[in-house]
Image (cartoon, grey):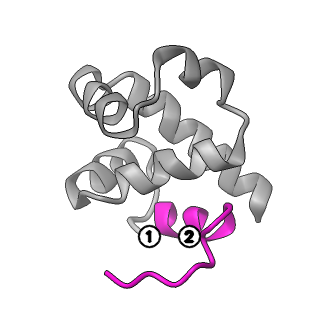
């Protein structure tokens, strides 16, 4: 499950990189740089942060899932398999 979650998160990162205005929001919100996108693409914690970011807005989740023909719950399921995903969420 973890490997498939990382693959989905990599796809999410690639999708995010193609969304210019949303990518700028991600970079600004996380403090990540464009070089981080390349250098940390295989880091499960960074990939988790990509999913955390997308999960903040239902419209972003739906746009990604529709672009990849995935069910709406796919991002949350992948996030649960990455570092910190089993932690309780209070929101």
Q: Which element carries disc 1, helix, strand or loop? A: loop
Q: Position of residue 42 (x, y in %)?
A: 73, 34
Magenta stretch holds residue 66: no
- 19 or 29, which is in the foreground? 29
**CB within 8 Å, label 2 to label 1:** yes
Q: Viewed as shown, does residue 55 lie left or right of 4? A: left
Q: Which element carries disc 2, helix, strand or loop? A: helix
Q: Position of residue 75 (x, y in %)?
A: 48, 60
Image-quadrant location for residue 18: top left
Highlighted magenta segment, given as a residue range: 74-91
Image-quadrant location for residue 55: bottom left
Q: Position of residue 76 (x, y in %)?
A: 48, 68
Q: Which residue is mark 1?
A: 73
Looking at the image, is 71 positioned above or below residue 32?
A: below
CA–CA distance in space, label 2 to label 1:
6 Å
The residue at the point 21 percent across, 25 percent down is 21
């Amino acid at each position: 499950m973890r490997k498939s979650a990382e693959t989905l998160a990599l796809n999410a990162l690639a999708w995010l990189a193609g969304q210019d205005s949303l990518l700028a929001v991600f970079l600004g919100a996380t403090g990540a740089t464009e070089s981080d996108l390349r250098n940390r693409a295989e880091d499960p914690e960074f990939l988790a942060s990509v999913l955390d970011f997308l999960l903040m807005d239902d419209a972003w989740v739906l746009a990604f899932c529709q672009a990849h023909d995935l069910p709406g719950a796919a991002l949350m399921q992948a996030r649960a398999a990455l570092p910190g995903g089993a932690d309780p969420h209070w929101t």
